[in-house]
Image (cartoon, rainbow, N blue to C red):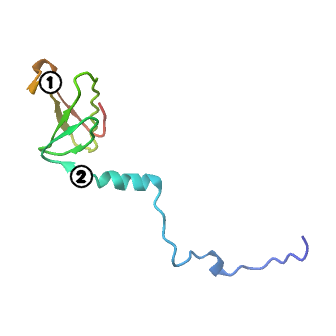
Amino acid sequence: MTNIVEAPQDDSLFKVPAEYQREKSPVEKAEEKEAARPVLTKKEETIAPAGRYIGTGGALHVKVEPDKSVQVVIENRIKEKSVYKVTPLRNGQPGKAEVIESSLTGKFKK
């Protein structure tokens, strides 16, 4: 290279174009999507697999095929203590020995 001249550059070369809009990161997009999910505050019946945010007064009844195994994952997504109850039903009747009642404090998973 020859005839290289060092000189100050025009500031306009380093300005963000007016039409530029900041793109959200994948993490920000995922957080917004999660925050927009509705919170269940009444009884709802569904089939497995099922995932819901459950608020005060919410109850999720999930029908599971009798010959299938079941995995229940409870996540507390708030800082306060959350109380939950899992009641397996057989022929529409609760199996008392199988009822699980517990709570989670902070952002934990069981």
What is the number of the mark on residue 99?
Answer: 1
Secondary structure beneath dot 1 equals: loop
Q: Quadrant of the N terminus?
A: bottom right
Q: Give above or below for 93 relative to 12.
A: above
Q: Residue 84: x and y, percent?
A: 17, 34
Q: Is 2 on the left or on the right of 65, as rendered?
A: right
Mark 2 touches mark 1? (CB < 8 Å): no
Q: Residue 79: x and y, percent?
A: 26, 44
Q: Is 61 on the left or on the right of 37, as rendered?
A: left
Q: Residue furthest right?
A: 2
Give the residue displayed 52% in from the left and 73% down from the top.
Answer: 20
Q: Residue 57: x and y, percent?
A: 11, 44
Q: Is 92 on the left or on the right of 81, as rendered?
A: left
Q: Residue furthest left?
A: 93
Q: Is 66 on the left or on the right of 26, as rendered?
A: left
Q: Give above or below for 18 relative to 101.
A: below
Q: Residue 66: x and y, percent?
A: 22, 23
Q: Amino acid at mark 1?
A: Val
Give the residue displayed 9% in from the left and 27% down from the top.
Answer: 92
Q: Earlier in the sequence, mark 2 or mark 1?
A: 2
Give the residue displayed 52% in from the left and 79% down from the top.
Answer: 18
Q: Amino acid at mark 2?
A: Pro
Local crowd at mark 2 within 10 Å, few (<14), some, or many (≥20)?
few
What is the number of the mark on residue 38?
Answer: 2
Secondary structure beneath dot 2 equals: loop
Q: Give above or below for 26 relative to 4.
A: above
